[in-house]
Amino acid sequence: MVSFTYIIKDKFGIHARPGLLLVQEAGKLTSNITIFKGTDSGDAKRMFCVMNLAVKQGDQITVHVEGENEEADAEVMREFLKNNL
């Protein structure tokens, strides 16, 4: 398993549009991807789970990536977050 943290910079946090883009990006990957905000967590491939975390600007999230391609998939998620959130 590969894990990394990221602080959300988008002034609206993970709202509908970037949330959908995140789910679509995660859906392209073969690894299981889980996003944690504090003690709450959600499957990054499911929109309801991502939106239920209610991630705001300045919140720190932890992303866990687990699977055969976890290193490459984690890098894809890092780049996505850096460029979109």
Image (cartoon, rainbow, N blue to C red):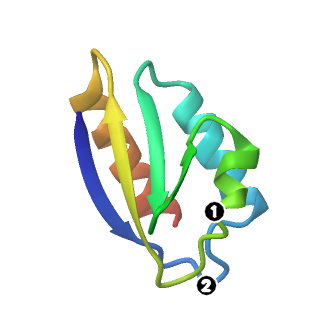
Horizontal side, residue 6 vs residue 12: left or right: left
Task: Identify the secondary structure beneath mark 2.
Answer: loop
Q: Is residue 1 left or right of residue 22?
A: left
Q: Nearer the viewer, mark 2 or mark 1?
A: 1
Residue placed furthest toward the front? 39
In the displayed structure, 53 sits above or below 65; it is below
Residue corresponding to mark 2: 11
Horizontally, residue 24 falls left or right of residue 69, namely right
Residue 21, how many percent across, how many down?
Answer: 65, 47
Q: Secondary structure at mark 1?
A: loop
Q: Amino acid at mark 1?
A: Leu
The numbered mark, 2 or 1, whose residue comes first in the sequence reads 2
The residue positioned 44% from the left and 28% from the top of the image is: 32
Which corner quadrant holds the N terminus?
top left
> In the drawing, what numbered circle is on residue 66?
none
At x 46% / y 24%, what residue is drawn? 29
- Residue at 63% over, 62% down: 53
**Position above or below: 55 against 30:** below
Which residue position is annotated with label 1?
Answer: 53
